[in-house]
Amino acid sequence: MSEATGSAVAAVPSQDEENAAVEGVIRHHVLALNSADEDAIAADWAPSGTLVDAFPPFVWEGDSPTRKWWRDLRAAIGSAGLTTVEFELGDWQRISVAGDHAYAVAHAKADVFGPELAVEARGTWTFVLTRSGEQWKIVSWNWGGPPNTPVRR
């Protein structure tokens, strides 16, 4: 209680705390992707969202877009003779929190491996999140960058 007014004062998170919370959700999402945990991947998302990536059909929307995207990603890498994908966040370019909305941009890479070939994708990963209560949820992410680079193994 505040001595001056006798009322409870709610703690207001600092900008650094807000940025860290948003970054934490995104880092958790990348860990879930790398462990191929479809339930954890979906749990990081709001009930409805939009996902944009550099392979057809390029956009996934609506309920559980990550489940649809994951299915299509697995099919795309499988048809190319690849088996494993690893994602990594690089340096943050920007994290902006405004109330219950956040925007975050990071350099990123995705490496896809197969027995004879690997593909390196370098780009920028842009996330939009919304907060409901104390939880941040992803409502959108977009991958952008130059064409992928195939590498013989």
Image: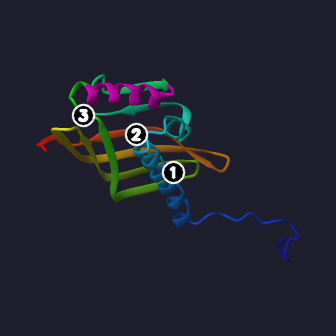
- Look at label 3 and name its amino acid: Leu
Does 64 appear in magenta?
yes
Discs 3/2, front: 3
Displayed quadrant of residue 68:
top left
User: Start and end of the magenta stretch?
Assistant: 63-78
- Give the number of the disc on residue 141: 2
Q: Amino acid at mark 2?
A: Trp
Q: Pointer 1: what residue?
A: 25
Task: Name the foreground residue: 150 vs 19.
Answer: 150
Residue under the point 43% across and 56% down = 95
Q: Is residue 21 above or below residue 140?
A: below
Is 85 placed above or below 99 here? above
Q: Which residue is mark 3?
A: 82
How many neighbours does mark 3 have within 10 angstroms: few (below 14), some (14-19), or many (20 or more)? some
Identify the element where label 2 is drawn: strand
Q: Main secondary structure of the magenta part?
A: helix
Q: Label 2: few (<14), some or many (≥20) within 10 Å?
A: many
Evaluate whether residue 135 shows in this view.
yes
Residue 148 appears in view: no
Asked if residue 68 is among those painted magenta in the image, a careful observer would answer yes
In the image, what residue type sits under mark 1?
Val
Q: Is 117 left or right of 61, judged from the image as shown?
A: left
Residue at the spot 26% in from the left edge and 33% down from the top edge: 54
Q: How many marks?
A: 3
Secondary element type, mark 3? loop
| Quadrant for the N terminus in the image | bottom right
